[in-house]
Image: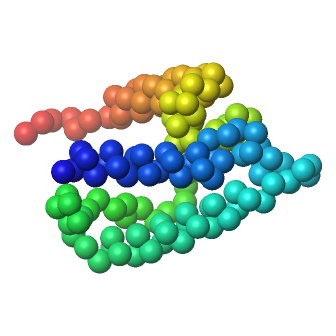
Amino acid sequence: MYVMTSLLAGLVFGFGLILSGMANPAKVLGFLDLAGGWDPSLALVMAGAIAVGSVSFALAKTRTISFLGAEMKLTTARHIDRRLIAGGLVFGIGWGIAGFCPGPALVALGMGEGKAFVFVAAMLAGMGVFELLERIKQSAKPGPMWKA
């Protein structure tokens, strides 16, 4: 049941991205081009997503298990740090250059969009580099002098 529900949710999400134009980099870049021929239509899509997400998270906070019986795992982090800001900047720059963010890029890849292939390859490479740097950082931390 869990797998089928996940598949259905993914299909609805992907269909929504196609229908809204989020999987079309030209439409996204038109939305981001505030100084040129700005296309405000994606602002309505984002407002709708924020509204649905706000209600969903408010409901999720009141529960300990999901409707399908899985444990609710909500973040408790509330601070803004350099890593969050840097990540947001890198995400925004990538979105502005390519016209894709991860979800729509995967949908466009499924639609056979060549630019999405390049974006997804770069995204996976970036994720690999991040993981490698995190492992190096963790291994460089001094451990306890004596283990019990």
Residue at 45% x, 25% y is: 128
Q: Is residue 2 above or below residue 61?
A: above
Q: Is residue 2 left or right of residue 31?
A: left
Residue 16 appears in the figure: yes
* Placement of the C terminus among the 4 image quadrants: top left
Q: Is residue 139 left or right of residue 35?
A: left
Residue at 70% x, 38% y is: 25
Foreground: 80 or 6? 6
Q: Is residue 42 above or below residue 131?
A: below
Foreground: 69 or 109? 109
Q: Position of residue 8 (x, y in %)?
A: 35, 49
Q: Is residue 7 left or right of residue 43?
A: left
Q: Position of residue 90 (x, y in %)?
A: 64, 40
Q: How many marks?
A: 0
Q: Position of residue 97 (x, y in %)?
A: 74, 35
Foreground: 28 or 16? 16
Q: Position of residue 131 (x, y in %)?
A: 42, 30
* Outermost residue toward the right in this view: 36
Residue at 42% x, 62% y is: 77
Colour treatment of the image: rainbow
Residue at 29% x, 59% y is: 73
Residue 93 appears in the figure: no
Foreground: 83 or 45? 45
